[in-house]
Amino acid sequence: MRQATCPQEADVLKSVRTGIWSEALSAHMETCADCKELVRASRWMQALAQSSATNPPLPDAARVWWRAQLSDKQAKAERAQELFEWSEIISASVICAALAVWIVWHWSAVQFFFASILAGALPHSWLTASPLLASTPAILFLSAVIVSLAAAVLAYPILARD
């Protein structure tokens, strides 16, 4: 801090605080550069003090830090959740593709299985369905794939969690 250079600085500060100016002190303030700067700085500080009184107080720094950490953790959890969702979709696709490949690879066993079910459940319709199964295995394969994909599409919203 600097030493007072003007002998009337104390009176000028008192006048700035109270707002009561004598004519002699006003005239001195206009001619003295130190006192003029002192008045300007004092008024600025008073305006700053009044404006900070009307502004709402800032939140606690610890609370702001805690919220920032919580927001960061939530963002990381959302990224991990997105990774899990993509892995779930890829796994379901691989399982459906593997099921389709297995059905193609073991087509004769699948055809025999469905034919035995059909013959056991409806023995009188076996005579009409047998030539259809033997002549068009692609229809049965296509229907099995469609049923598998429909089951996967219907089960996905049930298994997926928001």
Image: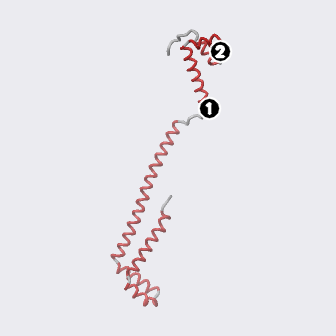
Pick out the residue farthest to the left: 105
**Three-letter code, disc 2:** Trp
Residue 144 falls in which quadrant of the image?
bottom left
Please name which of the two marks, 2 or 1, marks the residue nearer to the observer. Answer: 2
Residue 130 falls in which quadrant of the image?
bottom left
| Residue depicted at 59% across the width and 22% down the height | 43
Q: Residue 21 carries which label?
A: 2
Task: Say what secondary structure mark 1 lies in.
Answer: helix
Q: Are marks 2 and 1 in contact (CB under 8 Å)?
A: no
Q: Name the residue under label 1.
A: 54
53, above or below 40, in the image: below
Pick out the residue farthest to the top: 7
- Asked whether 139 or 151 is in front, the reply is 139
| Residue depicted at 36% across the width and 75% down the height | 103
77, above or below 115, in the image: above
Q: Where is residue 159 in the image (x, y as percent from the top left)?
A: 48, 63
Q: Which of marks 2 and 1 is nearer the N terminus?
A: 2
